[in-house]
Amino acid sequence: MIIDNPSFIGFLPPSNSKSSYTVQIYKLSIKDISIRHLQGKHFPIVFNTIHELTLENYHANGGFRSFNDGELAQSFPKLRFLKIFSRSIQHIVPRMFQHLTQLEYLILDGITAIENEAFLNLYHLKELNLGKHILRLDPYAFIHMSTNNLLLNQSHNFQLNDEKHFCAFAQFVPSTDLKTFVQFSNNLTDCSCTLRYLYRHLDKSFMSLTPNCYSNSSLYILTQEERICHFEQRLLQCDILPDEGITIYGKYYNVSHFYQQQISKQRNQFSIFFQYRIYYIVLLPVVIIVLCLIIRQQKLHHDSTYRYLDRLLKRRRLSRNVNLPTMETFDMIYHQTNNILDPIPSRTSVVTKV
């Protein structure tokens, strides 16, 4: 059944006056959903026969911004295939599909970011397709899930970075048995250590599915992957690793080995501090003395400035006190009677008080 109607607001609930009936639908596709938040009330009956559900919104403004996965899981208890596209849903948030535990195929399109624990409880996935627009993967995006195929081959703009993504993919391909195949875009030009880690046990029949930088690598380069990438050291930086352990070029590593190494590394960092504590003890008084000298110098500078200002103020007050009992000071301006310079000043004068 295909519903392509922007005015679709859900199925009508069954009437009690009518006889009950069973709807035999195996595939349901709803396009241009105008409903903002899709939930159980829009599917009032239980669709026991539907295995495939497609939810898409290409044109309806403001529609299909979120959905209630718990209520959808009750309405579609046998759902195995789910395809989602919405112009409004850009991020796959944590625990977004946690109640759809029976999903086997999950196809996402229009998604730009996958956040931590986005696919929690999806342990029966056979294929996880992340679509064309992935730009960001959080470090714990794929924990508490499993899948046979993880497809990133359509996201041509996704940049694989060892510092950001190595630990995100460290849980895949834990042993020599190929359990999860991760497919990236063929146009990757740089064969990062994450790629080498994922494909180190790859069968030759799958080599054509790998990026060009890896499928065209020489045999000599492929045999030097461990020396180039140092997988064991990189795995020590990861907080979560597969419980069953990891095999690297014929050598099996129990996961407890990495955790013990991480704990010992943390202890070594503290031990370095205690190893050189005598130098810290000697250096601490020196730092304190230097700080005291700097503070004292600043204080002396301020005190000298204040003393100088105080002297100026005292001098001004003294000069005022001395001039108070004496006669007032006058500035004499003489007016001459002719243009001839008279050395003897005229008796008539004009005085200006200052």
Image (cartoon, helix red, strand yellow):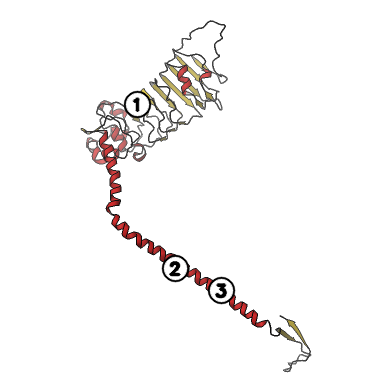
Q: How many marks?
A: 3
In this rendered view, identify the residue nearer to me: 134 or 40.
Answer: 40
Residue under circle 2?
297
The label nearer to you, 1 versus 3, is: 3
Quickly name the residue at label 1: 146
State if disc 2 and disc 1 touch (CB < 8 Å): no
- The three-letter code of the residue at mark 1 reads Ser
Mark positioned earlier in the residue sequence (3 or 2): 2
Image marks 3 and 2: residues in contact by CB distance under 8 Å? no
Q: Quadrant of residue 351?
A: bottom right
- Sequence-wise, the earlier of marks 1 and 2 is 1
The three-letter code of the residue at mark 3 reads Asp
- Point out the tag, 1 or 3, that comes first from the N-terminus: 1
Q: Where's residue 297, x and y in %?
A: 44, 68
Say which of 309 and 66 sits in front: 309
Q: How far apart, in angstroms, are the residues tagged by discs 1 and 3? A: 81 Å
Marks 3 and 2 sit apart, C-alpha to C-alpha, by 20 Å
Q: Residue at x 61, y 79 (%)?
A: 318
Residue at the left extreme, as displayed: 250
Q: Which residue is mark 3?
A: 310
Characterize the local packing of mark 2: few (<14), some (14-19) or many (20 or more) Cα atoms within 10 angstroms: few
User: Which residue corresponds to the image point at 38% horizontal and 64% vertical from the top-left?
Assistant: 289
The answer to which image quadrant residue 172 occupies is top left
